[in-house]
Image (cartoon, coloured by chain):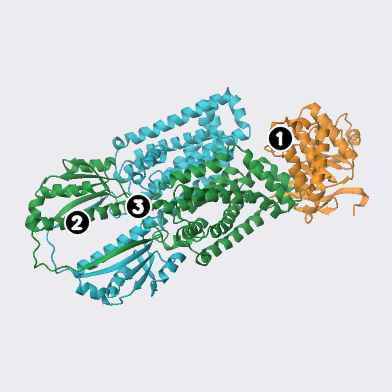
Chain colours: A cyan, B orange, C green
Amino acid sequence: MKRFVGFVRKEFYHIFRDKRSLFILFGMPIAQILLFGFAITNEINNVDIGILDQANDVTSKEIINKISASKHFSIVDIIHQESSIESIFKKGKVKAVLQFENNFGNNLIKEKQANVQVLTDATDPNMASTISNYISSILKKYQQELNENISIDYQIMPQSRMVYNAELKSVYMFVPGIMTVILMLVSAMMTSISITREKEQGTMEILLVSPLKPFQVIIGKVFPYIFLSVINAVVIVLLSIFVFNVPVNGSLFLLGIESVLFIITSLALGILISTISATQQTAMMISLMGLMLPTILLSGFIFPISSMPLPLQVISNIIPAKWFIIIVKGIMLKGIGIGFVLKETFILLLMTLVFIGVSVKKYKIRLE
Amino acid sequence: MMKDNNVIQVENLSKLFGDFAAVNQISFQVKAGEIFGFLGANGAGKTTAMKMLIGISSPTSGKATVAGFDVYKETESIKKNIGYMSQKFALYDDLTVKENITFFGGIYGLSKKQIDQKRCELVEELGLQEVTKSLVASLPLGWKQKLAFSVSLLHEPKIVFLDEPTGGVDPITRRQFWEMIYKAAHNGTTIFVTTHYMDEAEYCDRVSIMVNGKIEALDTPKKLKEHYKTDTMNDVFLKLARG
Amino acid sequence: MKIILYIIKKEFKQIFRNKGMLPIIFILPVLQLVILSNAATYEIKNIQFGYVDTDNSSISRGLIEQFESSTYFNVSEKFPSEKEASQAMQEGTIDAYLNIPTHFERDLQKDKTKDIGVFIDAIDGSAAGVINVYITQIIQNYNKSIVADLIQVSDAVQKPKNIDSIPLFWYNQTLNYKTFMVPGILVLLVTMITLFLSGMNIVREKEIGTLEQINVTPIKKHHFIIGKLFPFWVLGLGLLTIGLILAKVIFNVPMIGNLGLLYVYTAVYILVILGIGLFISNFTDTQQQAMFIAWFFVVIFILMSGLFTPIESMPKWAQKLTEFNPVKYFVEIIRMVMLKGSSFNDVFPLAIKTLVYAIVMNGLAVWSYKKTL
């Protein structure tokens, strides 16, 4: 045991002496969470649009005023011919063009029916459909104002309540996701690199012939990183509470325990990666190339898993980040207790055991 | 240009890291064709001094020329005229023997014909015919070191710098290695070699001994032994190192 | 020139000899392109929907039927009271529920208007917004139908004015997300592979000790660097080619514009990335440090590229920062050229920025590469 403590201490020295790496390890996650917490949102605001007003009458002008008053749009271009729409789309100057038909106002008064065409650049389908929804709701509202004195019979009025996030803040969605991505990648990358590095430099053999048992060697190597990652997790949670005002409705203690579990899962994955790679280069490429995009895309961080095709929903189950994101959102935003995240916790635990089991087996094969 | 036939001229050369003088005002000359032993304990400043001479580290003060070129301004010209073999084994493990030779010959600007000819000579001399197509990683350390030495001579440099070339190598291979050094010296190449094996110091024409960044002694092994009244270079070294 | 060739040959040999790396360089990106392009969709489908109906009238049942027949909703469960529904939302089994109060039908007939509670899990704010729109639309349509059912439309009612907005989706009528995501993810993969490999390459030689051996040769700085980076440049273009073929064959992504233009642009773009990689390499001592820095920038490049979340919605200062994000330019240009058929003139302002970026980065990289210690 004494020997083991000595070994762990050596590993700590190793890490803390390298000031530059230390700065990277702590500074970068903080920089990232601050940057993304403020900058990233999947709301759609300030979209540049163009107007092609063939009517140029009172009604169309009123509608244009309403649109330019909306925070969603800024009108950057007034177009005079239909033929120039294509070229401004190709230049990417605007994302949408609103086209008012000839005699727009007259039609509305005489025929009670007038049309606006919403031409959107649908190379970004999400943007296009959201723009078209926003514009149609602005038009609907304007229409209601026009029809104020006409009563419509029988109205079921939906009173929507946005549960857990009344103001629909993006940051509620992204902070847990960013925290997960950072913990996952930093932990997996650090362990896989530091173990393969010993292998590459031949020092692993020296450690393995020492009286320390192989699992002690591995635990000793990993232990400082658990410590570092926990500090990272604490800093991230503090930032999200105090800088981004994300509430922690559930137990902070439970959040802490689950974070440690997830860190250990990630480290175990790092160990597994180190067993299958011979060089640092391979280890890094697996942990970066192999983990980065799946962790961002298949975890529910940005894109809802339930909307994905079925095979991908199945694949998403093997992404540890998915389960941790459910846990973090549950504890922080929904304020749920351990009872509600038992399944997710159990899955993370099981993954950890599998990663460690496979690694131990691989190490044994190598040693024999 | 090369007065007195000196290929290396060093005058009051120093290298400071902050306040610490890793190399403290050393002066010496190395004659053409000589085997010059550059001795010192670990951390005495040998490697730092050598790195200034081969043009990858800039001196803090003092003067030095290597093959007639200034170590401040003409480092690239120095590099054309020297060979270097580092302490760390520095051929590519993931290339074959043949590929390593071709690569280094290539970046020294030898023609394809020259490279082919050199390679054949070298492979034959070292007895590597069987393994030209093996990865260097698979060779025993002694072979690797001999190969690295030969590679550093590919472009027929005037001077070759060897930094602890025989570290970790068995006595027989060390012996063979020194035969290669003699042969190169015989062909007119100047050899500048650091080592901490004192028996190897005996093979040198002249040796300098560095202690704490300074050169404390410089002469032929024979004269040094006489001067310090000892039988072996080892004892000379111990006397000096203990002050 | 001949010297550069020797270096290029050596680098290629080392890349192709590393059996552990080859699948990571070639197979991993292909797999990710094929699989992950399907994952990135903001389309909201399969909304798990529950309800509480203590009225149990024909109007309330009629409303639930509307949800059952919608393709967006999976009506999962009728809860006896709001407590159970709220708990199910906490567990995450439902995304939204409707609370229909007792005497709903009676009150509606009496007062002609009646509130109904809609509860949406809003942690994903943008998804919640979309779900809300869907629910509101279903209820509004239902309103119209009960008007028709419950009363005879009296001729006296004045016809309301109606403004229709007619959406036209250019370049992607079916709002197919893959058309959007495949080129974008391809950009990310090309960027990641070239940045990671170039970032590690020189620092790796530093760590092994071979760099010192190179530095004592009379080789010229720019020869060495060109020789080192050229193979990764080729690799990046190769990866782009593989990706474009897959995009066409598997995803049938339209390629309206000039592919030559795309290649010329990519050639310049990869130079930017290689310059960044080399720059990182020069300022680090170990591969570990280099990779952490590369990782830091890649995460920022990816999340601030406008690929997954819109740049327009970012605060002004963050939008300014994205001007330094090369990935943003590439994502935009590949989309413009492939999907819209933009010409050289259209992409010129973006392309020129990329070119300047390439010159600056490579200038910095060559300048900061020192043959001395």
| Chain of the residue where label 1 is placed in the rendered structure | B
| Chain of the residue where label 3 is placed in the rendered structure | A
Q: Amino acid at mark 1?
A: Val
Q: Amino acid at mark 2?
A: Asn
Disc 1 + disc 2, Cβ < 8 Å: no
Is the same chain shared between marks 1 and 2?
no
**Label at residue A245:** 3
Find the distance from the CA under tag 1 to the CA under tag 2: 77 Å
Q: Position of residue B238 (x, y in %)?
A: 80, 32
Callout 2 secondary element: helix
> Which of C186 and B88 lies nearest the eye of the viewer?
C186
Q: For this view, does C157 lie left or right of residue A273?
A: left
The residue where tag 2 is placed is C141
For residue A154, above or below residue B27: below
Q: Quadrant of the C terminus of chain A?
A: top right
Q: Quadrant of residue B139?
A: top right
**Label at residue A214:** none
| Chain of the residue where label 2 is placed in the rendered structure | C
**Label at residue B136:** 1
Label 2: how many Cα within 10 Å (few below 14, some 14–19, many 20+): few
Q: For this view, does C298 lie left or right of residue B70?
A: left
Q: Position of residue B5 (x, y in %)?
A: 92, 48
Callout 3 secondary element: loop
Callout 1 secondary element: helix
Q: Position of residue C292 (x, y in %)?
A: 54, 46
Is the same chain shared between marks 2 and 3?
no
Q: Quadrant of residue B242?
A: top right
Find the distance from the CA under tag 2 to the CA under tag 3: 38 Å
Disc 3 + disc 1, Cβ < 8 Å: no
